[in-house]
Each structure stands twice: as C-alpha cells, then as structure tokens.
Amino acid sequence: MCYILHIANEFTACGHQVVFRRQRIDCNSNACVLSNQHRIGHHDCHSTCRQSLMREQTWTSGRLLRPCDACYRSGNFSTPA
Ligand SMILES: [Zn+2]
Ligand SMILES: [Zn+2]
Ligand SMILES: [Zn+2]
C-alpha cells in the first residue's frame, strides 16, 4: 500500500524531530487506487483495489547536536548549542 514517508532530522539538543521532506512511496500494485500502476480499464475498483494510504512513516535521516530552528530562535532549550 502506498504511503507518505516523512524524512526528518533529529536535533539532540532539544530532542525534536523536524521533517524536512515528504515523499510519496508507491507500492507499484495494480490493485491500489493510489499507485501509478493502478489498472486502467473497467474493473470493480471498490471491492478489488485498496482505496487509502497507509499511515505515514517517519524516517530519521540524521542526528544533529544543535537545537532545531524553532528552539534556537526562541532560546527554548536546556543544552547550549
Ligand atoms: Zn499503493
Ligand atoms: Zn481500481
Ligand atoms: Zn526543538
């Protein structure tokens, strides 16, 4: 099933995960209404095809020692950057 992948950085100084990219992952199934491979032509779509996205997934791509931008701007973090 298709889903939205959130790619995030984790900021260890404040503990926040900040999503900087969203990517749609295609399941490449012809029985999924959201896939690019969804079958063309007449078929009983509602009973044979998946109709919805799976829950969003978050992937942490990197860990940074500084606080996130929001915390940095507000000074709302305990450990100095
Ligand atoms: Zn799909
Ligand atoms: Zn269909
Ligand atoms: Zn933060």
Image (cartoon, rainbow, N blue to C red):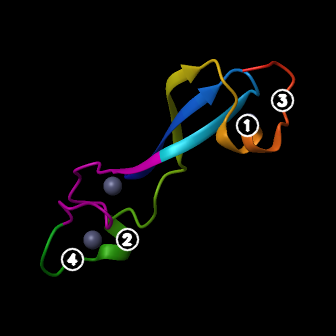
Q: Magenta segment, which residues?
A: 21-38
Quadrant of the rendered image containing residue 68: top right
Which one is in front, 59 or 34? Answer: 59
Give the numbered dot on residue 47: 2
Element under label 3? loop
Q: Please name the amino acid that badge 4 sits on.
A: His
- In the rendered structure, which disc, 1 or 3, sits on the residue that comes first in sequence? 1
Give above or below for 10 relative to 3: above
Badge 4 density bin: few <14, some 14–19, many ≥20, Cα 10 Å: few
Question: For the residues marked 1 and 4, what is the alpha-carbon distance in whole angstroms?
Answer: 54 Å
Residue, disc 1: 72
Q: Please name the amino acid that badge 3 sits on.
A: Phe
Question: Relative to 26, is 59 on the left or the right?
Answer: right
Q: Is mark 3 within 8 Å of ligand 3?
A: yes
Which one is in front, 46 or 70? Answer: 70
- In the rendered structure, which disc, 4 or 3, sits on the residue that comes first in sequence? 4
Give above or below for 48 relative to 9: below
Question: For the residues marked 4 and 3, what is the alpha-carbon distance in whole angstroms?
Answer: 55 Å
Front label number (2 vs 1): 1
Question: For the residues marked 3 and 2, what is the alpha-carbon distance in whole angstroms?
Answer: 51 Å
Dots 1, 3 in contact, CB < 8 A? yes
Quadrant of the rendered image containing residue 44: bottom left
Dots 3, 2 in contact, CB < 8 A? no
Residue, disc 3: 77
Q: Is mark 4 within 8 Å of ligand 2?
A: yes
| Residue ID at (79%, 19%) | 80
Which one is in front, 52 or 59? Answer: 59
Element under label 2? helix
**Percent position of residue 55, x then y:** 55, 50
Residue, disc 4: 43
Q: Is mark 1 within 8 Å of ligand 3?
A: yes
